[in-house]
Image (cartoon, grey):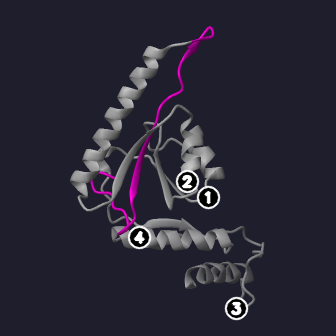
Amino acid sequence: MGGGGRCPPGVPLHLVHVVPLPTVFYGESHEAPAEAFRADGERIVSNALSVVRNDQPTLPVEGSQLPAGTAGDVLLGLAGDASMVVIGSSYSRRDEGYLNGTALQLTHQARCVLTVWRGTSRDAVPDSKAVVVGVDGSECSTAAVGQAFEFASLVGSSVMAVHSWQPGFLPASAPSTAPVTADPVAAAEEAVLSESLAG
């Protein structure tokens, strides 16, 4: 969140670092690397806290270094009481088309919003680009639209809703009020988009 990111008013920020599992080689645990991991984690958490407090002095923030485990399992446990979990991408290229294992685990199992940051610290400040949200008329889609508007309001941006369809196939979620036109499929799909944004 440092460098210009913003939390909603009154929402605390919890910075978490997970200590890597101890290295085991031929049945023997190496304690020295484990201690080095813990010391490195303390430094990481301390530096992150300093950045956030300098950037947002009034934001409630705490930092934790949690015992050895996988990042996915630890963050999944914390996600139950979170409104959003934010992680960085392990890929250096923005156009990399894959999510890492931690992101995939959280995407499939976390019961809160997940943000995967693919940028760098140099461009962490939210800009005026639109927040893009895909809609299909489902309950999940409705929740996504709400989150998109909430985030757009937070950073002073607009929302672009995107809905696509296959020509010739009426959507299962098409409203009964869809107008009758020369192209009923397009009319029904446009009605899905309109109804998704109406709430």
Query: N-terminal of the two: label 2 or label 3?
Result: 2
- The amino acid pointed to by label 1 is Arg
Q: Are marks 1 and 4 in contact (CB under 8 Å)?
A: no
| Residues rendered magenta in the picture | 1-28
- The amino acid pointed to by label 2 is Ala
Give the prevailing secondary structure in the magenta stretch: loop
Q: How many marks?
A: 4
Q: Are marks 4 and 3 in contact (CB under 8 Å)?
A: no
Residue 15 is a magenta residue: yes
Q: Are marks 2 and 4 in contact (CB under 8 Å)?
A: no
Find residue 152 and name its label.
4
Quote the CA–CA distance across marks 4 and 3: 31 Å
Quote the CA–CA distance across marks 2 and 1: 7 Å
| In front of the other: 188 or 80 | 80
Which of the two marks, 2 or 4, is nearer to us in this view? Answer: 2
Query: N-terminal of the two: label 3 or label 1?
Result: 1
Residue under the point 61% across and 45% down: 104
| In front of the other: 139 or 185 | 139
Query: N-terminal of the two: label 2 or label 4?
Result: 2
- Left or right: where 131 falls relative to 47: right
Residue under the point 33% across and 71% down: 156
* Crowd tier of the residue under label 2, counting other residues whose Cα lies within 10 Å: few below 14, some 14–19, many 20 or above: some
Helix or strand or loop: what does disc 2 sit on? helix
Which of the two marks, 2 or 3, is nearer to us in this view? Answer: 2
